[in-house]
Amino acid sequence: MMKFVSGDILLSNADVIAHGVAPHDHFDHGLALALRERWPALAKDFRHYCHQNNPDAGHIYAWGGPDKTRGSVKIVNLMTQEASAHQSGHPGKASAHYVGHALKELAKLATKEGYTSIALPKLATGVGGMEWAEVEPLIQKHLGDLGVPVLVYSEYHAGQAVDEGL
């Protein structure tokens, strides 16, 4: 079940927050930056993981850590974009192939871990450069049959909590 909401995804009560990044991402734009500011260990642990494993676009990195308001948080980093060609450069663009593969891995993880809900932004449409009309069917295809709420934060409003119906 996919539900569109407007508000601050960082205030979501979903079991998991998922977002798009590139391998070796610096977490310095958009939602990734907001996540890094709220949970600095996420970006640090992601960089360590990337240096150790050199992942390719299309894969995921799941992270969990403490949260002041929720007790704990689970974040899944979907590597929807190509890695930067240079260590300090900007990530490459997202592609339907990478998005689809990362969502497929997220669905497997959600089933294995028993996630009860997933919140994500309009994945790969910001820095990733994709059109929502191309991304939405991929989310529906890979997450639509999980049997759990999939909350798509279609508009960001800082500090605004949403009644997610959870």
Image (spheres, rainbow, N blue to C red):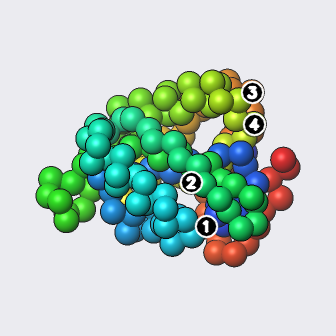
- Could one spot residue 144 in this view of the protein? no
Q: Amino acid at mark 1?
A: Tyr
- Apparent side of residue 20 relative to residue 159 in the rendered image (left or right): left
Label 1 crowd (10 A; few <14 / some 14-19 / many >=20): some
Residue 40, how many percent across, how many down?
A: 49, 67
Task: For mark 3, give the secondary structure.
Answer: loop
Q: Amino acid at mark 2?
A: Pro
Q: Which residue is mark 1?
A: 156
Task: Identify the image quadrant of residue 12.
Answer: bottom right
Q: Which residue is mark 3?
A: 147
Label 2 crowd (10 A; few <14 / some 14-19 / many >=20): many
**Of marks 4 and 3, which one's residue comes earlier in the chain?**
4
Measured Cα–Cα span from mark 1 to mark 4 = 23 Å
Label 4 crowd (10 A; few <14 / some 14-19 / many >=20): some
Q: Amino acid at mark 3?
A: Gly
**Of marks 2 and 1, which one's residue comes earlier in the chain?**
2
Mark identifier at residue 116: 4
Residue in the picture at 65% in, 30% down:
113
Mark 3 vs mark 1, foreground winner is 3
